[in-house]
Image (cartoon, rainbow, N blue to C red):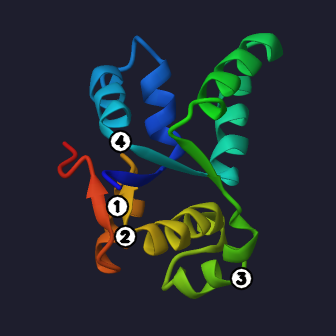
Amino acid sequence: MGRVAVVDTNVLLYSINRSSERYREARELINSLDKIVLPTIVVYELVWNLAVAGVTPKEAEKIVSKILLNERVSLADDRKYFLPAFDLFGDIGLKHYNDSVILAIAKEVGTLATYDKKLRNRAGKLNVKLLPEVVE
């Protein structure tokens, strides 16, 4: 099928923020994927971050529509991962639940695109392939 990855919120945010130091890298990463798996929690986090950044609802709708209507994007029905996510906590707190849901999906898909160092560390312990391969 080609390159498939679960994409975390931070990758999306970097890919739409032209002033981000990771803008170009995030765009290239997303464009290199044949299929982008988005947990619905990522969409909620994206909208929340856009709101915090002061983006208008109309502009947020344009951004989210462009992402969701992309033929390479598929939404993961993360409901089936709500309970398995609890098994992935280890010694971290409940505030990492959203990341645990994302991680549960990535564990099934096999690849995770994220810049979140804690999430990358957790994914690596589960043998989930990481994109980008190295984060500085």
Number of other residues with Cα within 10 Å of mark 4, as a class: few under 14, some 14 to 19, many 20 or more: some
Q: Secondary structure at mark 1?
A: helix
Q: Earlier in the sequence, mark 4 or mark 3?
A: 4
Q: Secondary structure at mark 2?
A: helix
To which residue does mark 4 refer? 33
Which picture quadrant has residue 18?
top left
To which residue does mark 1 refer? 120
Query: How far across and down, in percent of the image, does residue 124 sit?
Result: 29, 71
Viewer-side residue, 53 vs 101: 101
Q: CA distance from mark 3 to mark 2?
A: 18 Å
Number of other residues with Cα within 10 Å of mark 3, as a class: few under 14, some 14 to 19, many 20 or more: few
Give the amino acid at mark 1.
Arg
To which residue does mark 2 refer? 123
Give the amino acid at mark 4.
Leu
Query: Is the C-beta separation of discs 1 and 4 under 8 Å?
Result: no
Query: Is the C-beta separation of discs 2 and 1 under 8 Å?
Result: yes
Q: CA distance from mark 2 to mark 4?
A: 19 Å
Q: Secondary structure at mark 4?
A: loop
Q: Which mark is residue 111?
A: none
Q: CA distance from mark 2 to mark 1?
A: 5 Å
Q: CA distance from mark 4 to mark 3?
A: 28 Å
Query: How far across and down, in percent of the image, does residue 84 sit?
Result: 63, 83
Residue depicted at x 17% and y 49%: 134
Q: CA distance from mark 1 to mark 4?
A: 18 Å
Which picture quadrant has residue 9?
top right
Q: Earlier in the sequence, mark 2 or mark 4?
A: 4
Farthest residue, direction front: 1
Residue depicted at x 74% and y 25%: 51
Which picture quadrant has residue 60?
top right
To which residue does mark 3 refer? 83
Number of other residues with Cα within 10 Å of mark 2, as a class: few under 14, some 14 to 19, many 20 or more: many
Q: Is residue 93 visible?
A: yes
